[in-house]
């Protein structure tokens, strides 16, 4: 089912034939396989992983695969026209939405640093100049890579699942798939993997609530910007990539705190009225012709 707005009221309509599951399955399978293949060839390309990881473009490949056989539907989803979101909600305050979302990324990093510092008694900091490559190059490449991910997770899969589920449930589903897609995480300690999954699901809720009702390049840039800020913050302040459990747990809990705030905001927002789509009007029978006007030919009653 999808929702459309008619005279300020959202209406339930049938989704495309086959529902979202076929497209979601193809997207997810290709995203996994493409990420693995890109990760395998990265050493041969000479592209430093510190700058960008080619695996990030796996979800973009998944979107491309679905577009090969459902181009019109894919284009509709990427434009933001496929979900049940409150259409137009917040369009007049897009700047506030962007600031709140990007500020949430900064808040997540800050909470992670504070929590880790309180637990360890201090936090390390890697100056941008101490990195192996120019920070501007890393930041730009991280944004491109983040958009390569987010065009799949937030611009395709999230709107697709919104045709069946509400904001929170669809966000949790996307976040779970997003976390599972990071296969190497599961080679780490169970607590590390658990902290990471909490983080991906929580960040997915933040993004799902913040971006509900948006579409197009605006949605992609906001999702990519959020993703990039989090990645850069962790790069400069944390060592979670080493497999250390404590920073990952601090990160997951920080994401959860911010996600709960966004979920509460979503729950307090006034919900639009939902009404079922009107049933097709029955065919009208033709009015009988007065005997005085009838000819010699027999009269036919249409719609019987």
Image (cartoon, rainbow, N blue to C red):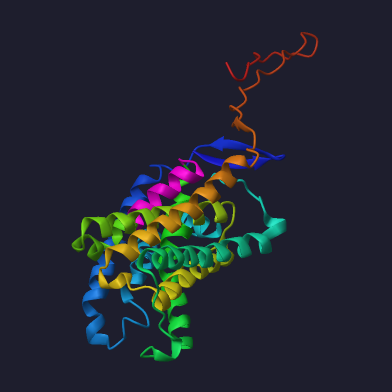
The residue lying at 35 percent from left, 62 percent from top is: 62
> Residue placed farthest to the front in the image?
121
| Front one among 150 and 253 | 253
Residue 150 lies, with reference to residue 18, above or below; the image says: below
Q: Is residue 165 magenta?
A: yes
Image quadrant containing the C terminus: top right
Q: Which residues are magenta?
A: 164-178
In the rendered image, residue 118, in percent from the top left (x then y), is placed at 41, 64
What secondary structure prevails in the magenta region? helix
The residue lying at 28 percent from left, 68 percent from top is: 35
> Residue placed farthest to the left in the image?
187
In the rendered image, residue 110, in percent from the top left (x then y), is placed at 49, 67
Kindly indicate the quadrant of the structure image that contains residue 156.
bottom left
In the rendered image, residue 139, in percent from the top left (x then y), is placed at 47, 81
The residue lying at 41 percent from left, 62 percent from top is: 152
> Residue placed farthest to the right in the image?
292
The residue lying at 42 percent from left, 42 percent from top is: 17
């Amino acid at each position: 089912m999808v929702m459309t707005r008619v005279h300020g009221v959202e209406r339930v309509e049938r989704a495309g034939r086959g529902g979202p599951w076929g497209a979601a399955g193809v997207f997810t399978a290709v995203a996994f396989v493409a990420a693995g293949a890109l990760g395998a060839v990265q050493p041969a390309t000479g592209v430093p992983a510190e700058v960008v990881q080619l695996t990030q473009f796996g979800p973009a490949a998944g979107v491309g695969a679905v577009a090969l056989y459902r181009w019109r539907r894919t284009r509709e989803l990427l434009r933001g026209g496929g979900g049940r979101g409150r259409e137009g909600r917040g369009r007049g305050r897009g700047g506030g939405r962007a600031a709140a979302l990007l500020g949430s990324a900064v808040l997540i990093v800050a909470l992670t640093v504070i929590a880790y510092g309180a637990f360890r008694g201090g936090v390390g900091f890697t100056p941008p100049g101490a990195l192996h490559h120019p920070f501007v190059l890393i930041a730009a490449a991280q944004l491109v890579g983040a958009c390569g991910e987010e065009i799949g997770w937030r611009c395709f899969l999230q709107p697709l699942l919104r045709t069946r589920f509400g904001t929170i449930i669809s966000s949790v589903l996307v976040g779970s798939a997003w976390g599972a897609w990071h296969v190497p995480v599961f080679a780490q300690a169970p607590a590390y993997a658990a902290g990471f999954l909490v983080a991906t699901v929580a960040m997915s809720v933040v993004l799902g609530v913040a971006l509900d009702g948006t579409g197009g390049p605006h949605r992609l840039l906001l999702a990519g910007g959020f993703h990039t800020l989090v990645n850069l913050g962790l790069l400069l302040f944390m060592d979670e990539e080493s497999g250390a459990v404590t920073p990952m747990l601090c990160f997951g809990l920080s994401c959860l705190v911010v996600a709960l705030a966004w979920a509460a905001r979503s729950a307090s927002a006034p919900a639009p009225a939902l009404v079922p789509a009107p049933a097709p009007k029955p065919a009208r029978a033709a009015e009988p012709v007065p005997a005085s006007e009838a000819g010699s030919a027999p009269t036919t009653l249409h719609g019987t």
